[in-house]
């Protein structure tokens, strides 16, 4: 009985990993051999990056805020967004 439960748990875990991998955005760089915990961590990290991108876009839409930014800070935000879009499109390793 214990072997059957263990087998079912392993099968269910593999099914969950496959579903998570399939649902992962390209930028998360989830590989087929990544274990469940790694897939979950990559997806959480990517979700945080997407939230940062959303915030940066809101800030960039505020002309007065952007006008008061130091050029280096503005350039840093623009580089971050460019890297995000390159990675999300799968054109960056």
Image: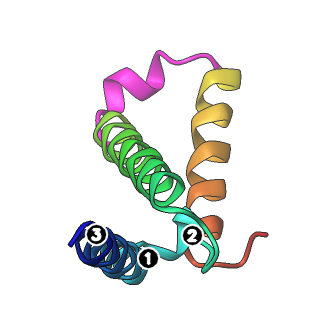
The image shows a total of numbered marks equal to 3
Q: CB under 8 Å between callouts 2 and 1? A: yes
Of 13 and 28, which appears nearest the observer?
13
Q: Position of residue 3 (x, y in %)?
A: 32, 73
Q: Which residue is mark 1?
A: 21
- State whether residue 3 is above or below residue 64: below
**Residue at 26%, 66% in the rendered image:** 2
Numbered mark located on residue 71 in the image: none
Residue segment shown in magenta: 61-70
Of 24 and 63, which appears nearest the observer?
24
Instruction: Single out the residue that lies furthest toward the front.
Output: 1
Q: Which residue is mark 3?
A: 9
Q: In 3D space, how far apart are the residues under numbered discs 2 and 3 (Cα atoms)?
A: 22 Å
Q: Position of residue 56 (x, y in %)?
A: 40, 38
**Residue at 29%, 33% in the rendered image:** 62
- Where disc 3 sits, the SS reads helix
Mark with earlier residue (2, 1)? 1
Few, some or many residues within 10 Å of mark 1 (<14, 14–19, 20+): many
Q: Toward which corner of the image does residue 15 lie, by quadrant?
A: bottom left
Mark with earlier residue (3, 1)? 3
Q: Toward which corner of the image does residue 48 lie, by quadrant?
A: top left
Q: Nearer the viewer, mark 2 or mark 3?
A: 3
**63 in the magenta segment:** yes
Answer left or right for 84 relative to 61: right
Q: Which residue is mark 2?
A: 30
- State whether residue 75 is above or below residue 87: above
Q: In 3D space, how far apart are the residues under numbered discs 3 and 1 (Cα atoms)?
A: 18 Å
Answer left or right for 26 relative to 79: left
């Amino acid at each position: 009985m214990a072997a059957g439960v263990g087998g079912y748990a392993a099968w269910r875990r593999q099914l969950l990993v496959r579903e998570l991998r399939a649902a992962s955005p390209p930028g998360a760089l989830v590989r087929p051999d990544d274990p469940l915990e790694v897939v979950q961590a990559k997806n959480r990290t990517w979700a945080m990056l997407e939230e940062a991108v959303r915030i940066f876009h809101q800030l960039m839409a505020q002309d007065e805020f952007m006008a008061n930014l130091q050029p280096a800070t503005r350039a840093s935000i623009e580089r971050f967004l460019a890297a995000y879009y390159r990675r999300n499109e799968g054109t960056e390793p």
